[in-house]
Image (spheres, grey):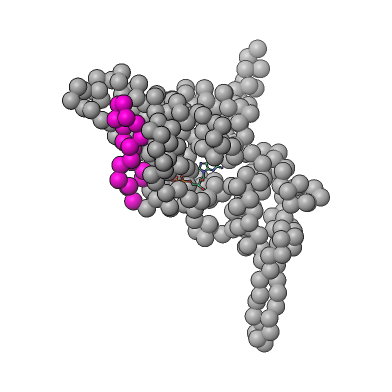
Amino acid sequence: MHENFSFRKVVVGNKPYAYVLNKSDLTDLTQKDRILSKLEKEGYAPTYFTNLRDSSDKTYRQILPNIISQIESQYRFNRELVTNFHLLVVGVPNVGKSTLINRLRNFHLKKGNAVKAGGEPGITRAVQSKVKINNNPLVYIYDTPGVLEPRFENIETGFKLACLNCVKNHQVNSDILADYLLYKLNKTKNFKYVEFYNLEVPSDNILEVLLHIAKSKSKIKQLKGFDNSNKKIYDIDAAGHMMIKHYFDGHLGKSMLDDDLITDLIQDDLNLEKFV
Ligand SMILES: Nc1nc2c(ncn2[C@@H]2O[C@H](COP(=O)(O)OP(=O)(O)OP(=O)(O)O)[C@@H](O)[C@H]2O)c(=O)[nH]1
């Protein structure tokens, strides 16, 4: 869970809020309840795992009533003269902020989409005009462009965000990123890629895997030799981009790059066993 802590302190402060962990369809949620209770202990409550791609997941419907009840229970925000409330959706690029706004509006107001959503990071480029999402009480919401810290606290945070298509692909070398992804998939014993790419066995050799992808998907590029002759070679870079796209589109299985959350839970289990 990537979060800018100074943002949490300065902007969220004591205001009513909800944490929404979207794209849960792409996530390994076998430990969902324990993750939620761990996050709750760390002060991230209420937190919702949502899948906004699947209309059968109704979890997002709980978000607005929860925020309204937080507003109504705090005198500071619920003054008699105030007849409408304004919410702000904030998060890293491409996590589904605009999609969430549309879904809230569709459900609570029974009205059509009001903001543009898309598969590339950076679709929302400016704070949009407010969008009405509820009538009683009157609630408006602002969409904001995805925000990232100017510098990542460590390189791994950057890799994780790039694997999830939160930063534009060309900002990162695709074979290095694919190497990180392969390491994570192997580390979490998620071997779906073996089946998906028709490999014989799992591998920790990224060049081997990318060459296999380039061959099987006919990713070829032309190079001009010194003698002006054209040479065809397998395009490892294109294969890297393809593998990352397959990952964030969910073809390489459900996974959680923040596996340190799970590691912590396993450590808790071990500690408990020792204690018992
Ligand atoms: N798999 C999956 N895709 C989703 C989900 N929610 C939204 N998407 C897709 O994710 C992409 C980005 O959605 P947006 O709503 O534009 O994301 P955003 O956070 O507003 O993006 P920026 O404007 O770049 O900050 C779109 O292609 C959505 O269809 C989800 O729950 N699961």
Figure quadrant of residue 17: top left
Residue 7: within the magenta? no
Magenta residues (range): 126-144
Pick out the residue farthest to the left: 81
Residue placed at 49% from the left, 35% from the top?
21
* 237 sits left or right of 15 in the view: right
Pick out the residue farthest to the top: 276
> Looking at the image, is 255 positioned above or below residue 42?
below
* 91 sits left or right of 180 in the view: left
Q: Toward the viewer: 224 or 126? A: 126
Residue placed at 29% from the left, 30% from the top?
138
> Looking at the image, is 128 positioned above or below residue 168?
above
- Quarter of the image that includes the C terminus: top right
Residue 131: within the magenta? yes
Residue placed at 71% from the left, 38% from the top?
189
Residue placed at 65% from the left, 86% from the top?
228
Q: Position of residue 38 (x, y in %)?
A: 52, 24
